[in-house]
Amino acid sequence: MRHLFRFKNKTRNHSNITSNDLNIDKQNIPEHIAIIMDGNGRWAKQRKMPRIKGHYEGMQTVKKITRHASDLGVKYLTLYAFSTENWTRPTEEVNYLMKLPGDFLSTFLPELMEKNVRVETIGFIDALPEHTRKAVLEAIEKTKNNTGLTLVFALNYGGKKEIVAAVQMIADLYKENKVTLDDINETTFNDYLFTKNIPDPELLIRTSGEQRLSNFLIWQSSYSEFVFDDTLWPDFNENNLEQAIKTYQERHRRFGGL
Ligand code: V0D
C-alpha cells in the first residue's frame, strides 16, 4: 500500500499549468507542424473586449508556442497569420493586424536569435503595407543563418491563389519554350509554390473547434494528420501542443524505430 502515499510528499507536487504527463515520444516529433490560429475574436468577445485585444493575446501565444516547438525539436512551424480573405475585415482591425509583425519582432527577436530560430514567410507579401513588409524582411534577413526551428508566417496567403500563381508561372515558361509538358509533374510543380523549400506538414492543427481547412496549405496538406482542438488560440498552451502531438503519434505509431 506504499504507493498510496507516493504523492503525499508536498515537495513532489510543484505542478503548474504547463506541466503534463502526456509522455510524448521525443523520437517521433513531427518535423513540420502547421497551425490555423483560430478563436482570437471569440476570446475577446467572451470578455467584452475589442477584437484587437484577442489578436494581441494571440500574438503572445505565438511566442509561447514557438518557444515550446523549438524546445521539442520541431524543424518547421507554419502559422496562418493573415489570409488573402482577411482584407475584408474592418479597416481598423486590418490596420492593427499589420502592426503585429513589427511588435512581435521588436519584443521577440533577441529570443529568436538565442533559440537559433529562422523566420520565413509564405504568401503575397508585396501587397502588405510598407512598414509591415519592412519588419518582416528585416527579421528574415537577421535570422537567415539560424539553423534551428524555421518559423514560417503565412501572410496574405491563400492556397487556391498560390496554385493559380504557380500555374501562371509555368504557363509563362511554356509559352517561351522553357518547359515541356513532360517537365510538369507533382515534384516539379512544388518548385512554383511558396513552400518550395519546406517539407509538407505531417500535422495540421486548428484551434477553436472549427473543422475546416479554409484555404490553408491545400496542396501541401494532402497527407497531413488533422487535429482539431476546441481551445481558443489565446488560451492554447504547451499542453495543448503536446496533446496534438500525442494524437498524431497515436495515429502514427512507430514500431522499433521503423
Ligand atoms: C493575429 C493570432 C505574429 C492570429 C496571432 C499580419 C492573428 C497574432 C505575427 C507575425 C498575428 C507575423 C510575421 C512576423 C512576425 C510576427 C502576426 C499577423 C497577425 C498578421 F515576421 N502574430 N501575428 N501577424 N496575430
Image: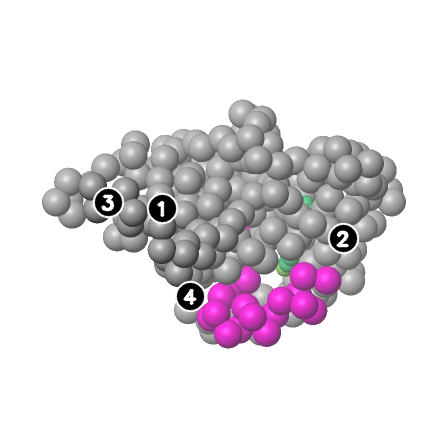
Upstream in sequence: badge 2 or badge 1: 1
Residue bearing mark 4? 148
Task: Return the x and y of residue 180 as percentages of the image width and height.
Answer: 40, 41
Indicate which label's residue lies in the foreground, 1 or 3: 3
Q: Quick check: 28 left or right of 114?
A: left
Kindly state the secondary structure of the residue where label 3 is placed. Answer: helix
Q: Residue 3 carries which label?
A: 3
**Badges 3 and 4: C-beta atoms under 8 Å apart?**
no
Q: Residues within 10 Å of mark 3 (few under 14, many from 20)?
A: few
Q: Residues within 10 Å of mark 2 (few under 14, many from 20)?
A: some
Q: Which amino acid does label 1 sit on?
A: Asp
Q: Which quadrant of the view contains residue 185?
A: top left
The answer to whether residue 25 is visible is yes
Q: Read off the magenta span.
A: 103-124
> Does 194 appear above or below 226?
below
Upstream in sequence: badge 4 or badge 1: 1
Upstream in sequence: badge 2 or badge 4: 2
Indicate which label's residue lies in the foreground, 4 or 1: 1
Q: What residue type is labelled 4?
A: Gly
Q: Is the CB atom of the residue marked by disc 3 within 8 angstroms of ligand 1's nearest atom? A: no
**Badges 2 and 3: C-beta atoms under 8 Å apart?**
no
Q: Based on the picture, tell me whether residue 110 belongs to the magenta stretch.
A: yes
Q: Is the CB atom of the residue marked by disc 1 within 8 angstroms of ligand 1's nearest atom? A: no
Residue bearing mark 1? 21
Kindly state the secondary structure of the residue where label 1 is placed. Answer: loop
Indicate which label's residue lies in the foreground, 2 or 1: 1
Image point (82%, 36%), residue name: 48
Distance between the alpha carbons at the discs numbered 2 and 3:
55 Å
Q: Is the CB atom of the residue marked by disc 2 within 8 angstroms of ligand 1's nearest atom? A: yes
Upstream in sequence: badge 3 or badge 4: 3
**Badges 2 and 4: C-beta atoms under 8 Å apart?**
no
Task: Return the x and y of residue 242 as percentages of the image width and height.
Answer: 41, 45
